[in-house]
Image (spheres, rainbow, N blue to C red):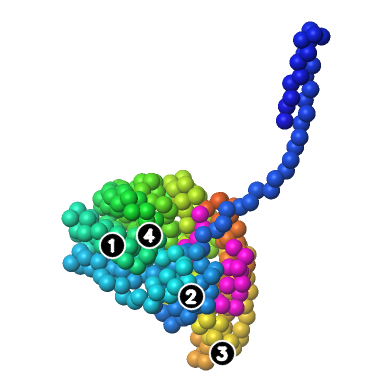
Amino acid sequence: MFKYITSLRAGFFVLLVCVTISIVPVQAHAVEKLFYYFDNMYGYSYFKKNNKHIDVIAPQVYTVEYNLTVSSPSSTKILREAKKNKVKIVPLLVNADFSKVLMSDILINTSAQDKIIEFMIKEADKRDFAGWQFDFENINHLDRDLYTAFVAKTYAEMQKHDLEFSVAVVPRSVPYDPTLTNQDWSSGYDFAALSRHADFISLMSYDDPYSVGPVASLPFKERILGYMMTQIPPSKISLGIPLYCWKWDAINNKRVGSTTHKLAEEHYKKGSDKSRGYDPILASEWLRYTDKNGMSYVTWCESTESLTAKLDMIETYDLRGFSAWAIGQESTAWFWRLMKKY
């Protein structure tokens, strides 16, 4: 604070500087906790038990079918339970079988798009949804501009009805090159353009194709964010977090599938020659064991340490929050205790 005192009678100015410094702690914004849901053995019961620690539930229950219409919800119990507990509901809309041909059909048929949007608005009003998320995948990279146009049209209509709208994308760590003959699923998204026509973008930043163990290591997420933040404002990024584990053949160093935390722990407890630990570089827990048939496996899962590292990353980069796939696969032993802190 500066005060200037003037004395005309004395014919000169006296400058009195009074500096007051106050230190006010900066409060980090709340991390938005979005959980995906699909019907599975534990998803519904875990939601019922822990919904007070969930900001948004995003059920995968609506599909655009091959006739270009939206299906009725494949399950409504999660919709009723979320509404009863006043948890924001933002369902996913997916293309059937993640079909590339179907996606092209949708994107060239503006009349079908209009009907899809009309359904979304009416269904949101009927079931008290907070909004929708597009989870269209396996989009032909030649259709990426058509997809952006569809997203832009949808976003404009969602805004008119005060509905939140977001887009799930397969992220990448390097710029898109249209001249490449071998394009992956991330090539169908113009990230910068999509972010201008959505309230936020959920990065499906898991299933690292070059993984040596974890579903999504910390270095993998750093590489993804290093590029994605040049395309999408950090405040619009919801970082994808996997709640499932990857199981590897320990002898042949080959991934054999995914599993839940619960099953990973059960198999580990029944095994022999057991060991477990935490890799601080990859930020993942590992469990090594031999089963009753003499097969050796190592399973990589999230842990308190690894998830804390990812949550710290979200706060460091000032991201919107996280999108977790999917409730029912997590460890209940420590996971929800950690969620209480955020």
Distance from disc 3 to disc 2, alpha carbons, whole Å, reads: 28 Å
User: Which residue sits furthest bottom?
Assistant: 292
Q: How many marks?
A: 4
Q: Nearer the viewer, mark 3 or mark 4?
A: 4
Residue 270 tag number: 3
Q: Can you tell which of label 3 and label 2 is closer to the viewer?
A: 2
Front of the two marks 1 and 3: 1
For label 1, the SS is helix
Residue type, mark 1 in image: Lys
Instruction: Write down the residue under mark 2.
Output: 47
Q: CA distance from mark 4 to mark 2?
A: 19 Å
Which mark sits nearer the N-terminus, 2 or 1?
Answer: 2
Q: Which residue is mark 4?
A: 131
Q: Secondary structure at mark 4?
A: strand
Looking at marks 4 and 1 on the same chain, the residue that comes earlier in the sequence is marked by: 1
Check disc 3 and report its element: helix, strand or loop.
helix
Q: Which residues make up the magenta segment?
A: 320-342
Up the image or down, 286 lies above or below 104; here it is below
Identity of the residue drawn at 62% across and 80% down: 275
Query: Which residue is depicted at the point 47% across and 71% down?
Result: 85
Three-letter amino acid code at the position of disc 3: Lys
Look at the image and tell me whether residue 313 can be seen.
Answer: no
**In whole angstroms, how far apart are the C-alphas of marks 1 and 3?**
51 Å
Nearer mark to the viewer, of 4 and 1:
1
- Residue position marked by numbered label 1 in the rendering: 122
Residue 131 is a magenta residue = no
Q: Are marks 1 and 3 in contact (CB under 8 Å)?
A: no
Q: Amino acid at mark 4?
A: Gly
Q: Mark 2 or 1, which is nearer the eye?
A: 1
